[in-house]
Image (cartoon, rainbow, N blue to C red):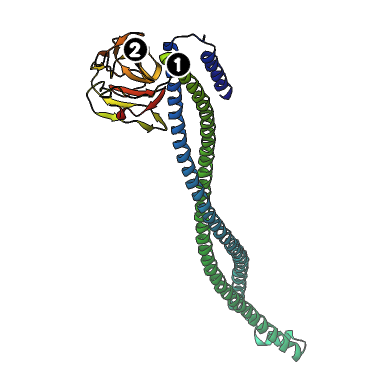
């Protein structure tokens, strides 16, 4: 883009200074009007770029503030998430140990239940055997024993076996009941631990979503800020190029104005004094825009609002310097009144005079319109003294 601007300025310079020294006033004024129109366009772009620069800077600052604010939120959410994860790991380990203990207790209980069933069955068989078998008579027992001691031992042995079977069944039953109660307690503790672990897991998941949401928002803001920073850089670059171009065009405009002053009235400067009675109004209507700064550039005349086709009168007698299309001025008429004083009438819909024609005060020189760089039908009226624009209201 910079090379294109440089090439454009070079071409403009060639067009400005390569023209023959003896070129007519029409060409000089036309080139100046074209350059001034280009300057006005660029100054509008500079104004918009400056506004855009301010908006982007404010938006970037606001986004950066939000990002910095989210940093604390993300840090807090991350810290809380890590704490929950630590607690969750501890409770999960506890639950795992309780699950393992419950499994072992269940196996032991199943074993004791089996042992109890077997001991009861054995005891039952013993009892059934005692009651169903033919009891030996006392004579047989006595005769079978070789001694009194052996007789006593046989009776005692038989009784001991019965008592042992019953004792085993009783102990196994007690152990089974005790283990069953212990396992029931473990089951309750495990259920409580599982509930707490599930609750902590849910809170951890929720906290993870909160943290991830904050991080995602922070990343989105960072991406938006990067886009705005890129746009700001582009706007600033364009603004700098516009400024460089305007500065070059202003120099060209000044050079053209000097040539106009040199050609006006044979190159002689004058006091620029208004004719007796002052200048006449070119049209009768309200002043819609005054003389002075407007949109970042100098508005070198006044705008008088009138309908299209309204006759435009010469403010004073003089000679037509310009009569034709002049870029942003649209259809333009410039009159030389002598003594360094000139007037200009822009944005006309039609012209009634030609270059070199002598006109009198009040004579119709054009019809008002909306041509060139214009936003509604009006007459752009300028007063220039030795080529420099002055406030027309001081002369009317």
Using the image as rendered, state which of residue 358 and residue 287 is in the foreground. Answer: 358
Which quadrant is the N terminus positioned in?
top right
Q: Position of residue 358 (x, y in %)?
A: 31, 10
Total number of numbered discs in the rendering = 2
Please tell me which of labels 1 and 2 falls first in the chain.
1
Q: Position of residue 111 (x, y in %)?
A: 63, 67
From the viewer's perspective, tell me whether residue 151 is left or right of residue 44. right
Q: Position of residue 296 (x, y in %)?
A: 42, 33
Q: Is residue 363 above or below residue 271?
A: above
Q: Secondary structure at mark 2?
A: strand
The label shown at residue 360 is none
Q: Position of residue 320 (x, y in %)?
A: 34, 12
Q: Secondary structure at mark 1?
A: helix
* Residue under numbered circle 2: 319
**Residue 133 visible here:** no
- Residue most toward the bottom? 148
As measured in the structure, the alpha-carbon distance from the residue carrying label 1 to the one carrying label 2 is 15 Å
Residue positioned 34% across, 12% down in the render: 319
**Residue 158 visible here:** yes
Q: Is residue 244 above or below residue 209?
A: above
* Residue under numbered circle 1: 267
Mark 1 Cα within 10 Å, few/some/many (few <14, many 20+)?
Answer: some
């Amino acid at each position: 883009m910079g090379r294109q601007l440089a090439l454009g300025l070079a071409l403009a310079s060639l067009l400005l200074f390569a023209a023959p020294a003896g070129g007519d006033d029409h060409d000089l004024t036309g080139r100046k009007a074209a350059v001034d129109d280009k300057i006005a366009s660029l100054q509008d772009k500079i104004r918009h770029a400056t506004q855009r620069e301010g908006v982007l800077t404010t938006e970037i600052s606001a986004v950066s503030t939000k990002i910095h604010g989210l940093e604390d939120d993300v840090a807090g959410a991350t810290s809380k998430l890590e704490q929950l994860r630590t607690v969750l790991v501890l409770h999960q380990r506890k639950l795992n140990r309780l699950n393992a203990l419950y499994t072992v207790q269940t196996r032991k209980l199943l074993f004791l239940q089996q042992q109890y069933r077997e001991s009861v069955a054995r005891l039952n068989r013993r009892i059934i055997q005692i009651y169903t078998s033919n009891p030996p008579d006392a004579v047989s027992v006595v005769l079978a024993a070789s001694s009194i001691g052996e007789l006593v031992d046989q009776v005692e042995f038989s009784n001991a076996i019965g008592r042992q079977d019953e004792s085993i069944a009783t102990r196994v039953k007690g152990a089974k009941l005790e283990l069953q109660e212990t396992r029931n307690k473990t089951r309750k503790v495990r259920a409580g631990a599982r509930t707490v672990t599930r609750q902590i897991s849910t809170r951890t998941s929720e906290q993870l979503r909160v943290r991830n949401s904050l991080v995602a928002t922070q990343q989105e803001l960072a991406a938006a800020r990067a886009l705005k920073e890129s746009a700001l850089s582009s706007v600033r670059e364009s603004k700098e190029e516009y400024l460089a171009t305007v500065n070059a065009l202003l120099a060209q405009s000044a050079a053209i104005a000097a040539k106009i002053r040199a050609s006006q009235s044979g190159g002689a400067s004058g006091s620029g004094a208004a004719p007796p009675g002052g200048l006449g109004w070119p049209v009768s209507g309200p002043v819609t825009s005054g003389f002075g700064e407007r949109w970042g550039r100098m508005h070198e005349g006044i705008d008088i609002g009138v309908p299209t086709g309204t006759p435009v009168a010469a403010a004073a007698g003089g000679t037509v310097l310009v009569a034709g299309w002049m870029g942003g001025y649209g259809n333009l008429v410039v009159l030389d009144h002598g003594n360094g004083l000139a007037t200009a009438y822009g944005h006309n819909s039609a012209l009634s005079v030609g270059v070199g024609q002598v006109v009198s005060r009040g004579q119709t020189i054009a019809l008002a319109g909306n041509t060139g760089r214009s936003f509604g039908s009006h007459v752009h009226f300028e007063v220039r003294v030795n080529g420099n624009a002055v406030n027309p209201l001081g002369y009317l």
